[in-house]
Image (spheres, rainbow, N blue to C red):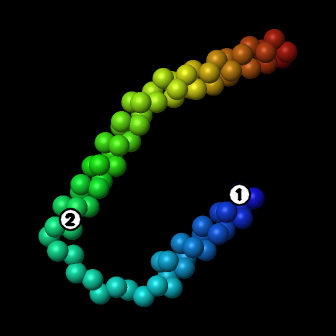
Amino acid sequence: MSRRILWVAIFAAYFVLIVTPAAQAYLDPGSGSFIFQVIIGGLLGAAVAVKAFWQRIWGFLAQRKADREVEDKVSEEIG
């Protein structure tokens, strides 16, 4: 299933990048400012999301670390 999704994504990217004609577009000076604002907004939004879910993220990582330590102890006892 995941390979099918990957192939669809590759085909879509190929279609968008290769098949579509080049645009004869003009970027005015305000476009750069808008793009900058979108990038900064996205970064700040991601930072707020990380801050809001930090406890869940940290708990998930700590659980994975604890699981690995248990697996290491079990493999040492067996081996």
Q: Is residue 13 left or right of residue 44?
A: right
In this view, which residue lies farthest toward the right? 78
Give the residue displayed 72% in from the left and 16% down from the top. Answer: 70
- Residue position marked by numbered label 2 in the rendering: 32
Question: Where's the N terminus, which quadrant?
Answer: bottom right
Give the residue displayed 29% in from the left and 49% down from the top. Answer: 41
Residue 68 x/y as whole percent: 68, 22
Q: Is residue 8 left or right of residue 43?
A: right
Q: Amino acid at mark 2?
A: Gly
Residue 67 x/y as whole percent: 68, 21
Q: Quadrant of residue 49?
A: top left
Mark 2 vs mark 1, CA separation in Å: 37 Å
- 26 and 74: which is toward the camera: 26
Q: Earlier in the sequence, mark 2 or mark 1?
A: 1
Q: Is residue 5 left or right of residue 44?
A: right
Residue 3 x/y as whole percent: 72, 61
Q: Quadrant of residue 71?
A: top right
Q: Amino acid at mark 1?
A: Ser
In this view, which residue lies farthest toward the top? 77
Instruction: Determine whether 30 is above or below 47 in the image.
Output: below
Q: Residues within 10 Å of mark 2 (few under 14, many from 20)?
A: few
Question: Where's the C terminus, which quadrant?
Answer: top right
In this view, which residue lies farthest toward the front? 52
Give the residue displayed 64% in from the left and 69% down from the top. Answer: 8
Q: Quadrant of residue 5?
A: bottom right
Residue 65 x/y as whole percent: 61, 22
Callouts 2 and 1 close, C-beta under 8 Å: no
Q: Residues within 10 Å of mark 1 (few under 14, many from 20)?
A: few
- Residue position marked by numbered label 1 in the rendering: 2
